[in-house]
Image (cartoon, rainbow, N blue to C red):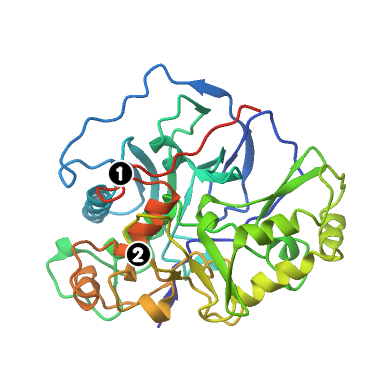
């Protein structure tokens, strides 16, 4: 039996006032729709010194606090799996600031019974990308830029929850994995990479939030008071391209077109009024085109930034017949990459297979984090040995 890794869930966008310097907080990774707009005062760093250069693989840049509702032996194995995952990421990324993770291992509700694990950034902040477009950056990434002035950060960078009701396998068991068991280390590594920012903003919540059938996709949208203030992308979307009539069109183009659907600062008093206004505009055709691409195999690619670890397009997950905000776009193509070194970020996980098995099947790459995945992380702003100076965003004080 197959189970989806339910890592990315649909956003719900409320008509809510922005503070002068807003941030978006996500208290529950299983329900990121329950987000909160938070006033983030400016912080001026007296000391932006990074952690000292150390040999990665020895240094673990992840600090994980685990709320483990199980027996002590199992909780110890879970802690070890998180430590191992943190070390693997620390080997390939030149992290400069510690990343703090709040993780919970517990039984989930009946509606979430098929969820292995779910992870989300605790906070996203608004920064200006190199193309002068404001986008959302996950806090874990924003910290790495060592900005002199930045929005106030949350205590934790990443929130994770894992389902205690599955039969988990751990390397420390020193036993052969059983056909119904899932390797916990695979799921943890996958989830932490989502928490680092492997997340697209394109979803169908504009319609599903008002109980309408999905006919198009949009990026996140936000309001200042009751006035619409634009569609906005994640930094991940900076490098997305939609293949339309054999042409590769940046997803930012579609965002710009959708931002023409309603004049800036137009007031709305209900969600339904806003949704119907957007859908009645000529620009809704762009939302339809993105939906078509998101449900047509090999129709959306991630084009890495220059001089990263992978210099070719990376196909994202678009093979699902119906758009699934928990799977579509925010993973690499399962059909293309499940049996390659980039297996870790496909949308589905299967029981009875270990991390070591996946690594061997993928060609024994030097890390369970393959070159395509590393290139995506480099593109959004993480430094590596081969890409030590990623493009740094700027912070605009509102």
Answer yes or no: is residue 34 visible.
yes
Residue at 43%, 20% (x, y): give it: 45
Answer yes or no: is residue 188 visible.
no
Q: Identify the residue position indicated by label 1 in the image.
A: 388
Q: Which residue is outermost to the top?
A: 46
**Which part of the image, by quadrant, shows the N terminus?**
bottom left
How many marks do you count on the picture? 2
Looking at the picture, does residue 337 appear above or below residue 379?
below
Q: Secondary structure at mark 2?
A: helix
Residue at 53%, 67% (x, y): give it: 329
Measuring from the top left, give residue 194's x and y in whole percent: 43, 56
Q: Say which of marks 2 and 1 sits in front.
A: 1
Measuring from the top left, give residue 34's x and y in whole percent: 62, 49
Measuring from the top left, give residue 237's x and y in whole percent: 54, 57
Residue 106 lies left or right of residue 79; in this view the side is right
Q: Identify the residue position indicated by label 2 in the image.
A: 372
Residue at 73%, 60% (x, y): give it: 206
Residue 336 lies left or right of residue 353; in this view the side is right
Mark closer to the chain start, 2 or 1: 2
Q: Nearer the viewer, residue 339 or 16?
A: 339
**Where on the picture, by quarter, is residue 332?**
bottom left
Residue 126 lies left or right of residue 114; in this view the side is right
**Which part of the image, by quadrant, shows the C terminus?**
top right
Disc 2 from disc 1: Cα separation: 17 Å
């Amino acid at each position: 039996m197959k189970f989806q890794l339910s890592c990315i869930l649909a956003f719900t966008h409320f008509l809510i006032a922005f503070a002068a310097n807003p941030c978006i907080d996500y208290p529950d990774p299983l329900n990121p729709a329950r987000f909160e707009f938070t006033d983030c005062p400016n912080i001026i760093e007296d000391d932006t010194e990074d952690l000292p250069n150390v040999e990665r693989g020895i240094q673990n840049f992840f600090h994980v606090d685990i709320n483990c509702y199980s027996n002590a032996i199992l909780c110890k194995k879970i802690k070890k799996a998180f430590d191992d995952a943190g070390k693997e990421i620390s080997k390939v990324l030149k992290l400069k600031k510690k990343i703090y993770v709040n993780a919970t291992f517990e039984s989930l509700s009946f509606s979430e019974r098929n969820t292995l694990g779910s992870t989300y950034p605790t906070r996203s902040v608004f920064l200006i990308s190199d193309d002068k477009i404001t986008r959302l950056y996950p806090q874990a990434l924003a910290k790495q830029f060592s900005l002199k002035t930045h929005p106030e950060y949350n205590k934790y960078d990443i929130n994770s929850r894992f389902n205690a009701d599955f039969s988990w396998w751990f390397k420390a068991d020193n036993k052969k994995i059983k056909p119904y068991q899932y390797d916990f280390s695979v799921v943890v590594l996958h989830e932490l990479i989502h928490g680092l920012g492997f997340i697209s903003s394109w979803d169908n919540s504009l319609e599903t939030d008002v109980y309408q059938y999905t006919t198009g996709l949009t990026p996140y949208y936000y309001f200042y008071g009751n006035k619409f203030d634009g569609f906005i992308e994640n930094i991940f979307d900076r490098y997305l391209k939609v293949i339309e009539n054999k042409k590769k069109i940046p997803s930012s183009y579609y965002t710009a077109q959708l931002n023409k659907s309603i004049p800036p600062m137009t007031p709305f008093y209900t969600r339904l009024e806003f949704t119907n206004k957007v859908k009645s505009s000529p620009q809704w055709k762009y939302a339809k085109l993105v939906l078509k691409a998101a449900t047509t195999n090999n129709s959306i690619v991630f084009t890495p930034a220059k001089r990263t670890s992978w210099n070719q397009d990376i196909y994202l997950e678009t093979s699902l017949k119906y758009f699934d905000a928990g799977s579509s776009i925010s993973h690499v193509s399962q059909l293309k990459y499940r049996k390659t070194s980039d297996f870790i970020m496909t949308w589905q996980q299967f029981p009875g297979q270990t991390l070591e098995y996946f690594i061997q099947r993928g060609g024994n790459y030097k890390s369970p984090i393959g070159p395509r995945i590393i290139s995506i992380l480099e593109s959004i702003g993480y430094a590596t040995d081969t890409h030590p100076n990623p493009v740094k965003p700027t912070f605009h004080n509102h």
